[in-house]
Image (tube, helix red, strand yellow):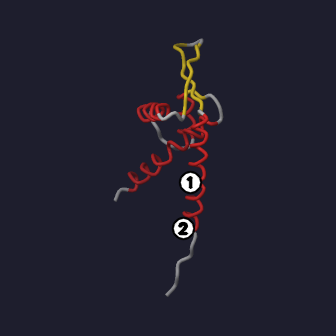
Amino acid sequence: MNLENTQVQMRKGILEYCILHIISRGEVYASDMLDELTAARMIVVEGTLYPLLTRLKNAGLVEYKWVESKSGPPRKYYTLTPTGSRFLSGLTDTWEELIHSTTQITQKSKTVI
């Protein structure tokens, strides 16, 4: 088994949750999302982020608007929809349950026989 592959899969599993959290704070540009994810050591490339943002939009969880840029082409800024906010709330509940369960399992001391 390859440790690096398992680590990548773990990160991918929570990527959607992290992206929704970033967007929940207000209008955000995709490259700013990439910067924040990279700073948090969630290694993501544009080829992963843009298809995920499209899926979130098609699911009605996020929307975007075009904003003119002084230094280039217009930019897409993403926000959560009300449905996206409810979805994120459900994911947050699940995340907190997972943290609790994982901590309970991983912090239990070894039984001596």
Q: Is residue 63 above or below residue 95?
A: above
Secondary structure type for disc 1: helix
**Which residue: 54% across, 44% down?**
17
Disc 1 to disc 2, C-alpha distance: 18 Å
Picture coordinates of residue 94, whole percent (x, y): 56, 54
Picture coordinates of residue 50, whole percent (x, y): 45, 30
Q: Is residue 107 above or below residue 70?
A: below
Residue pointed to by mark 1: 94
Of 94 and 75, the residue lying toward us: 94
**Which residue: 54% across, 15% down?**
74
* Quadrant of the rendered image containing residue 63: top right
- Which amino acid type corresponds to the residue marked 1 in the rendered image? Thr
Secondary structure type for disc 2: helix
Q: Quadrant of the N terminus?
A: bottom left
Q: Residue furthest right?
A: 25
Q: Is residue 84 above or below residue 94?
A: above
> What label does residue 45 carry, if any?
none
Q: Residue furthest left?
A: 1
Of 1 and 91, the residue lying toward us: 91
**Which residue: 48% across, 35% down?**
59
Left or right for 62, reference 54: right
> What label does residue 106 carry, if any?
2
